[in-house]
Image (cartoon, helix red, strand yellow):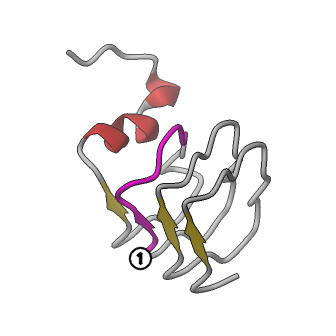
Amino acid sequence: MQKTPFINSSVKDVDFSECDLTHSIFKNADLTNTIFSNTNLKSVNFLTAKNYTIDPERNSISKAKFSLEGVLGLLNKYDIKIG
């Protein structure tokens, strides 16, 4: 699924485990309850995506793009408060 554009879409409850999404784009995509596990997310653009949770220890995320507010979706597993 490399270079797949998910634009202005609802990508809820999708399981992307073991997928290669290299260079894909999630533009204005709602990723509520979407699973990323052992997923190749290298150079994926999440800048305008929302409601995602991604474990950086279980996925390849080098050179992926995230908004400052979206980075919180990378920290959910740590159950910490950022204010």
Give the x, y percent position of residue 25: 49, 72
Judge left or right: residue 69 versus residue 9: left
Q: Foreground residue, 25 or 83?
A: 25
Up-down relation of residue 62 to residue 52 (above or below) = below
Q: Would residue 82 appear left or right of 29 to someone viewing this image?
A: left
Compared to residue 12, the image places residue 4 above or below, namely below
User: Which residue is at a point 51% across and 50% down the rendered structure image?
Assistant: 57
Q: Up-down: is 6 above or below 20?
A: above
The overriding secondary structure of the stretch rendered in magenta is loop
Q: Nearer the viewer, residue 16 or 29?
A: 29
50 part of magenta stretch: yes
Q: Nearer the viewer, residue 13 or 19?
A: 13
Q: Residue at x 28, y 50 (%)?
A: 67
Q: Residue furthest bottom?
A: 3
Q: Quadrant of the N terminus?
A: bottom right
Q: Quadrant of residue 7?
A: bottom right
Quadrant placement of the C terminus: top left
**31 falls in the magenta region:** no
- Name the residue located 45 percent from the left edge and 24 percent from the top edge: 78
Horizontally, residue 60 falls left or right of residue 36, namely left
Task: Return the residue at label 1.
Answer: 43
Above or below: residue 54 compared with residue 79 = below
Please give the name of the residue rendered at 36% of the width and 34% of the height, measured from the top-left corner: 72
Magenta residues, start to end: 43-53
**Residue 82 image point, x, y percent:** 25, 18
